[in-house]
Structure formats: C-alpha cells, structure tokens
Image: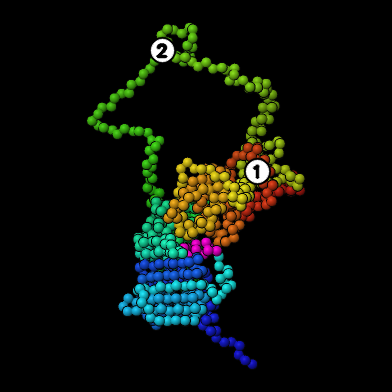
Amino acid sequence: MNDIIHLLPDSIANQIAAGEVVQRPASIVKELLENSIDAGATSIQLIIKDAGRTLIQVIDNGKGMSATDARLAFERHATSKIRTAEDLFALRTMGFRGEALPSIAAVAHVELKTKRKDDQVGTHLVIAGSAVEKQEEIACADGSNFAIKNIFFNVPARRKFLKSNETERKNILTELERVAMVNSEIEFSFIENDIEVIKYPASNLKQRIISVIGKSFNQQLISIEIETTIAKIYGFVGKPESARKARAQQYFFVNGRYMRHPYFAKAITSAFAPLIPVGENPNFFIYIEVSPDTIDVNIHPTKTEIKFENEQPIWQILAATVKEALGKFNEVPTIDFDTLDAIDIPIHNPNTNATRPQINVNPAYNPFKSSSGGQSSGSSSYQRPNFDWESLYKGFETDTNIESSEVREAIEIRSSESDLFEENPASLHYQYKNKYILTSVKSGLMMIDQRRAHVRILFDQFLQNIKLKRGISQRTLFPEIVEFSSSEAAMIPYLLDDIEAVGFDLSNLGNNSYAINGVPSEIDKINSVELIHNMVSKSIETGSDVKEEIQEALALSLAYAAAIPYGHRLTNDETSDIVNRLLASPSHKYTPDGKLVISILDDIEVDKRFK
C-alpha cells in the first residue's frame, strides 16, 4: 500500500501561509511599513493604485539588502531578526517570523529594487507566484523599493471577496496611521493614484497625533507619564468632554507595536467613569514600554494580540496614572475669555477719589393719582396709560366658576394623578411617567416606549429621504467646521451623497476638514459636528460595502440623535401622532437595531392581578 503523506511544495505552503498573513491589501501595507522601520528608515513613501488592487509600493531610505539577502528574504522562515529561540524573548523589531515576504510573493507579482549604502549597484528582483523570474544588478537609490502588483492574481476567489475600494482604502489608511503614530521621528507620505494625499513630517509625539487625528484634538489632550520597575507608560488621554458615543480614538502601543487590549481599555474607562455619561467612550493614545521578556507577541501573525506577564499590575498603574492626570486637569479652573455679555468693571485708580453717584428724584410723582382732575398743580406731568379693561377681558367666560365642593375635590384628585397619566379622551392614549405611552387594544393593554417609537418613526422617514434624496436642509447662520482623521475622511466621498440626501450641506475645505452649511430641518438643538462624527463612525463600524446597509446606518444615527428623550412631556396631539405613525410602520414592534418598542399585557394577565 502506497504512503499517503507527503511534503507540500513551497509554492503551496506559501499560499496557505498567505491565508493568515495576507488577508487584504492593508495586510501587505502593514508588513512592508514595519520592514522599512526595522531597516532604520527615516523617510517612507507609500504609493497605492485602485485601493491596492493594482499597486502597493513602499519606498524607504533604510539600510537596504545585498543580492543574496534580497533573494533569501523571499524564502520561508528566512529572517534577520532572530537566530535562536531565546531571541523570541528579547524582540525589539516589528517582524521576526520570516513569513510576510514569501506569503506576499505567493499571491502577487513582486518587484524589488534594493541597495546598501556602501554598494556601487543595487539588486533588481522580480517574483510572481513564488517563482523568481528575474534577478539582475541595477542602479537605484539607497534603501528598498517594494512594488506589489495584482494582488491575488492566482487566487481569484480571494480577489473576488475583497471589499469596495473605499473600504480597502480606509483599511490601508488605518494601518498607516497606526504605524505613523508610534514612529513620529519618521517622515511618512501617502500617494494615491499619482496624487500626494497625506504627508506626515517628522515631529514630536503630540504633533504627530494631532496630524493624524485632526487639529481639533490639539486642545483636548491631557498628558500622562509614569515610570516604574514594571513598565514605563506615557502618552495622552482626551478630556472628558471629548468622549464619543460611537467609536472613539483608542490606541495602545507596546514597545513600538500597535495592539488591541480590552482589559487595559477597561482600566482607562473605569478612570473616566465618574466624568463621562454612560455609553460614551474616552479617547486615548497610550504608549507602554516593558522588558521584551515579559511579553509574548508570538500569538497571531498580525501581532496585534500580546500576552503580558504583569498584566494586573500594569492595569492598576494605568488606571491610577489616568486618574491622577484627570484629577490635575480638573483642579485647574477654566478661564472664560468671552466678554460679550460681561459687565464693564472700571479699573481702580488709587490716585483718584470716587464720586458719589447722583440720583434724581421727583418728590411730586404719585403713581396712584390720575393725571386728570383733582391733581394738585405741583404734581408730575406723568399720565397713566388708559387701558380698555373691558376689551382686555373680553372673551373670558364668567359662567365657568366652580361652586361645588364635590367638583373641586374631583379636580384635586385628578391633578394629583396627572403625574402618572395624561388622558386623551379622543384616542384613549396615556403617557406614563413621561417615558411610556399606554393605550387600550382589543387583546389588552399596549405599552409603547416613546423614545424607541420615535426612533422607529424617524428612521423610516430619514431612510426614505436618503433613498429619494428629498431631505430638507436648513441653512446655518454660522457654518461649523468638522475635522476627520485620515481613515474617516477616506469614507466621506462614499457617504457624502447620502449625508446630503438626509439634509446636511457639507463643503470640502481640504486637509480632511468640511464646513457644515446646512443641517436637516428635523433636528433641533443638536451638536451637528458630533452628529456627523457619529454617523461616519457608525458607517465605519458596520464594515459593510452594501449601499443599503450604509444608508441604514446613517439613518439610524440621525434618528437616535433627533428622537425625543425620556422625561419629555407629550401633548395629547403628540401622543396620538406617535402612536398612529408607529402603527403605520411595517416594522413597528422593534427599533432598527432590534430593541423592543411595543409590549402588550393581555386581558388574562390583567384579570389575574385582581383575583
């Protein structure tokens, strides 16, 4: 009987490894940028075309490679970062597996031009599907120039499942932001379709964060820093008023590497808990430096999950440091320089004598005397206005005076119960504790959550406006400026038509900034800048490329922002209008995000309570 187990060819093994390492164009961007950083580059240029489908190119001025190193770099498990197993516990580099380049070469056309500083000529290498097609000497600049073309050309199923260009571009920018925020001493530039879109010059850490996230954060960052024997923690947290309901700007970096860590995020959230409303998320940019032998980054190929030996002590240090920073911020009183309505207080001059104010009084004025006959000749010339009291009170009914003590008692009882119920005799709808609407139906008592009902109604209305592009915009007296991060700004062109269809009027000011010239007429006394941010964040969180789903995310964000709050007193007409419009909705039982709107207490259950 023949043996059935055999070794896979390297080309197939590389394609299997590529399934974990190369998930999308952004994965290639991450690996190439990290390689450039490990090579000691001070300037890195990222060039993409068609959101990475056609071209991903990374050019750096790092140390470069020799001809032998360039060829070996594309072999499986070939790396310059480690030599022994002990080196895994002393990692100071971004990469170490030796899987990225062979995985990339297995699913794309790769062209590499590289040269060391001391070499006369460089190396030109061309690989397609793990097969080396060309290797020759070439004149090129110092450093490395990787060009990745036609990603997944030999894996059509993977290429077919790539998302839209807007989503892939957003993911690429997200990876660029994460790398740029932890390497502020390196200059980054981003060129898309032959146009330079972003440039991050070398700067200090705070300036780099502001460049990436937006200038609006300049006044919102609180510095934190502490150094212990376990870890050094530094960075910035946002002021409590900058917290967001939707996706906030939250970043952790460990030894120069971006990571996700919900446990540490909870430490920061607990420090902010007394200062921000429930449901809002603080912004933070936290950098942690620990000894490499106390962490394990060799968990997942993406290296965004890290195990800590001293996880609990770091949690306590992090929470205490953030609390201390927030305490110092709150101890300093804010100075309000708005003098528009301020009283003009003169500056005291000790060389001048204060004069007593002069008060003119007319002793002959008597407001109870008429200006006509009977007034003494020495009285004031003031004349009382002649009111037509009969016309003023005309229309008031005099026959509505209540004389019956029984009726007065009934009114007093009725008023004492009005805090619990408000009756509309025409429709028999009641508002209970300014939160629920109660109404009688054939099967029993129907209870409606008034805010969720309004969300359901407004969602249907806004979604219809978006689809039909008939949202009514109300011009603002003074346009407001809304700034986005690079990844958020990447989604704006894709969302702009729908945002404007619902009633917003935005104009591009450049540098990831937009002016809000108009807002939907349905919203009132709502922070339009925050609302726009929430709508964009909600659309990014969906991670969907289906136009209808993105439209629903925009409509839902706007509906929650414009819906009546709990505790709002409704008139009889408003109560009836909500019930009628809700029941006319084809999906009136639940909100668009699946929350219960209507609950019915049937007659049997009601009867049981009185037995």
| Spot occupied by residue 522 in the image (x, y as percentages of width and height) | 57, 44
Mark number, residue 578: 1
| Spot occupied by residue 7 in the image (x, y as percentages of width and height) | 55, 86
- Considering every residue shown, the one lying at the far left of the view is 351
Residue depicted at x 62% and y 46%: 454
SS under mark 2: loop
Q: Relative to 405, is 244 above or below?
A: below
Q: Amino acid at mark 1?
A: Ile
| Spot occupied by residue 176 in the image (x, y as percentages of width and height) | 44, 64
The N terminus lies in which quarter of the figure?
A: bottom right
Instruction: Provide the residue designation for mark 2.
Output: 364
Q: Quick check: is 171 in the magenta stretch?
A: yes
| Spot occupied by residue 381 in the image (x, y as percentages of width and height) | 43, 12
Q: Is residue 383 visible?
A: yes
Residue depicted at x 47% and y 41%: 477
Q: Quadrant of residue 334?
A: top left
Crowd around label 2: few <14 · some 14–19 · many ≥20 (10 Å):
few
Mark number, residue 554: none
Please count the marks in the image: 2
Q: Which residues are magenta?
A: 164-174
Colouring style: rainbow
Q: Is residue 312 visible?
A: no
SS under mark 1: helix
- For this rendering, which residue is in front, 104 or 388? 104
Residue depicted at x 63% and y 37%: 571
Q: Taken as a whole, is the magenta stretch helix, strand or loop?
A: helix
Mark 2–mark 1 CB contact (< 8 Å): no
Q: Relative to 284, is 363 above or below?
A: above
Separation of marks 2 and 1 at Cα, in angstroms: 62 Å
**Which badge, 2 or 1, is on the more N-terminal residue?**
2
